[in-house]
Image (cartoon, rainbow, N blue to C red):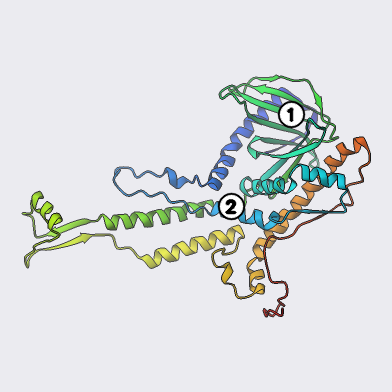
Amino acid sequence: MVIRVERPEDARTGAFIVDAIQKKFAENFRLQRLQNYYEGKHDILLRVFRGDPDKPNNKIVVNYCRVIADFLTAYLVGVPIQYSNAPSKLLEVIEYNDGADTDTELVTQMNIMGFGTELFWTDEFSMPRYTPIDPRESIVIIDDTVEETIIQYIRVFPTAEQGKGYNVFVYTDKDYQQYHLSESVGELTAVSELIPHYYLDVPIVLYENNKEKLGSFEGIMSLQDALNKLVSDELNDFEGFVDAFLVLEGMQATQPEDIDNMRLQRVIMTDPTSKAYWLTKNVNNTHIKDLKASLERSIREMANIPDIENIGALSSGTALRFKLIPTEIQASKQERILKKGIQRKLELLYNIMSIGGGVEDYTAIDVEFERNFVIEETENMDGVNHA
C-alpha cells in the first residue's frame, strides 16, 4: 500500500499511523484474495447448491493463477540477475543475503499482489541484510512531489501471541521505532526509543508490478472462476449420468420388491405397451470442449503467457519467439521496474558500507538479466536450423 502525504512531518504522528493501518487492513481483503487464488483457494470451493443437498457438487480448481505467476517469475529471474563491474565486497553482501532467492520472492510478490517490498537492516555481525516483506504488512509513505520520494515506511503484523494486538515498526531516513497496536486498532504505544539505522534513507525498496499495482493474474480471475465452474459442472453432469433415474413407463404396478429383484437379477421384464429407460440430461460435449478451450485461450492471452502444453510442439525457434512476444513485453516492463528498485538497493547498501570506507561507487554497476527460456540460437529467421 502506498500513501501520499502533503506534509511529511505529519506522517510520524500516532493518529496518522493508526489511520494508515486501518486503511491497510481494508486493502488487505483484496490482497488476501489474490494470495488465496495463487494458493488454489478459489471461490468454487465455497459453492453450495441450496435445496438439493444430494446433488453432485464437485469443486475443481484448475489453477491458472499459480501457473501465470510462477511462469512470469521463472521467465524473468529463473536465471539469477548478474552484476557487472560490481565491487567484490558488494557481491559478497548480495551472496550473503541469498540475492537470487530474494529476487525470485520479490517478483512472485509482484505477480501475485501487484507490488513487493524489501526491507534493510543490520545483523548482529554488522552485516547489511535485506529481505522481502509480505505486501500485506507493508505501508509505504511518499511525499506529494513529482519524484514521489519515499519518506517513511510502516510495517504492521500480528504479535506472536494471538489476540494481543499488532507489532508496528516505523522507519524514516534516519531511524526506526517500534510500537504496539491494540487488537481494536485504536491504541498505539511506543515500546522502544528511536533507533538509528545508518542507511541514510528510508531502508525500503518498493517494486510495483505496474502503476496500478495490480497482480499479473488479477484481470483473469473472473475467467478463472468460469473455468472452475465449467470443469466442476462437467464432472457433476457425469456423476448425474452415472446415477440417473430409471423410468419404468407403463409399469405403474411395479412394487419396491420388484425393483429390488430387478437389481438383483439384472433383468427387467416388459410388455409391448411398456418400456424402461434412463432419465438423463442431453449434454453437448463438443460445445463444452470448445468453451473450455476458449476460456483457457483467453486466460493465456490476457495474462501474456504462451500455451505451455503445446509449446514443445512448435516447429521452429522463430515460431517460439513469436509465441513469446506477449510474455517478453510483460517481462521487459517488469525488468525496468526491477532495475530501478535494484539501483535503490545498491545505493542503500553503498550508504551503509561506505561508513567503514573502502567501497567503490555503485553507479558504474551494470545490472544484467537473462531470460530463462531455451531457444536454438543457431536458427536464422527463415526458420531453418543451420547448426
Q: Residue at x 50, y 44 (%)?
A: 41
Q: In the image, what residue type sits under mark 2? A: Phe
Circle on res. 217: 2
User: Circle 2 — which element?
Assistant: loop
Circle on res. 170: 1
Q: Tell me where residue 158 sits by quadrant.
A: top right
Question: Is residue 143 visible in this depiction of the protein?
Answer: no
Quarter of the figure with the C terminus: bottom right
Report the side of 123 relative to 239 (left or right). Answer: right
Q: Distance between the residues labelled 1 and 2?
A: 31 Å
Residue sitting nearer the eye, 345 or 281:
345
Residue 54 lies, with reference to residue 274, above or below; the image says: above
Quarter of the figure with the N terminus: top right
Percent from the top left, x then y, of residue 134? 65, 38
Report the side of 36 relative to 239 (left or right). Answer: right
Circle on res. 361: none
Report the side of 205 relative to 109 (left or right). Answer: right
Residue sitting nearer the eye, 16 or 254:
254
Q: In the image, what residue type sits under mark 1? A: Val
Q: Tell me where residue 248 sits by quadrant.
A: bottom left
Percent from the top left, x then y, of residue 127? 81, 36
